[in-house]
Amino acid sequence: MDIDEYNRNAWNLQSLEGCQWSTPFSDEQIEKAREGDWEVHLTPGNPVPESWFPASLDGCELLCLASGGGQQAPLFAAAGARVTSIDHSDVQLKKDIDAAQRHGLEIETHHANMADLSALGDGRFDLIFNPVSNVYCPDLATIWKGCARVLKEGGDLLAGFMNPAFYLFDHDAIEQGGPMEIAYSLPYSDLDSRPIAELENLLTANLSLEYSHSWEGQLGGQIAAGLAIIGFYEDSWEAEATPLDSYFPLFGVTRGRKMAL
């Protein structure tokens, strides 16, 4: 089975069904962004601090990485940025295109895996915006190296990701009233960690396959690629999403800057 293609199709289906990350922003949100009134999220709870963005996005070369869905890309374009959107989901990317056309905005789009930035030139972007998405990729090093390559010196990568401890637990069992107890070792992968019967159920339901990544892979990987971590915060999900939210932050967010050699 081609895992990359499987996840693309799974996300296409998820986007068609609609979720928090695949519901296009309202016309009102886009129009407010034209006036400089906007906020964005890399994780479900807290918005990204204003101080992490330039005072003005006018002329900012901005890459929306794996953040299709008619949300951040059109909003950033409305706020004045020159936006490029890369997403592996055809449906998510089309929502960016449709939103841009509806509002008379220009967005460059590329249908590609987030680990493949080969269509983009070196040192092109001032800012990369990458919401939680690397859980669908088995290897982070290629992603961080690609981001560092396409950033200008002094450019920032804003990235959200899952706390690896999230993957210690059997969430299906917890949702059914089971105890919150450790069920898996790390690193976790849907392909290798789940019992065969559970994996078959997941594949039958066309749910995307996920991988855990260590703090070393998330933070150390960015540093190894040439980025300096100059900002960090943690975030939580809505309480009804999982009871684990009451015990530890489920998300981390980094601001990584490409430093001069």
Image (cartoon, rainbow, N blue to C red):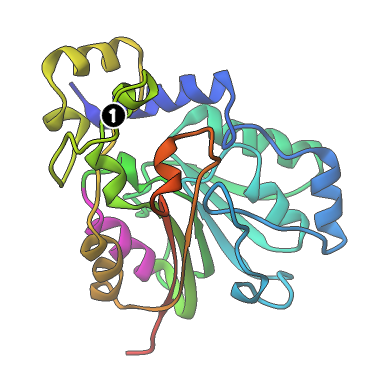
Q: Nearer the viewer, residue 81 or 174?
A: 174
Quadrant showing the C terminus? bottom left
Q: Is residue 248 above or below residue 80?
A: above
Q: In this view, does 125 lie above or below 197?
A: below
x, y percent for residue 37: 82, 60
Image-based side of 173 in relation to 48, left or right: left
Secondary structure at numbered mark 1: loop
User: Picture quarter containing residue 223?
Assistant: bottom left
At 25% from the left edge and 66% from the top edge, which residue is drawn?
221
At 41% from the left edge and 50% from the top edge, which residue is drawn?
250
Q: Is residue 132 above or below residue 239?
A: below
Q: Nearer the viewer, residue 229 or 164?
A: 164
At 45% from the left edge and 46% from the top edge, which residue is drawn?
246
User: 10 Å neighbourhood of mark 1: few (<14), some, or many (≥20)?
Assistant: few
How many discs appear?
1
Q: Is residue 242 above or below residue 197?
A: below
**Furthest residue in direction bottom, as rendered:** 261
The residue segment tinted magenta is: 139-149
Image-based side of 117 in relation to 93, left or right: left
What residue would you read off at disc 1? Answer: 179
Residue 26 sits inside the magenta stretch: no
Image-based side of 172 in relation to 249, left or right: left
At 26% from the left edge and 30% from the top edge, which residue is drawn?
170
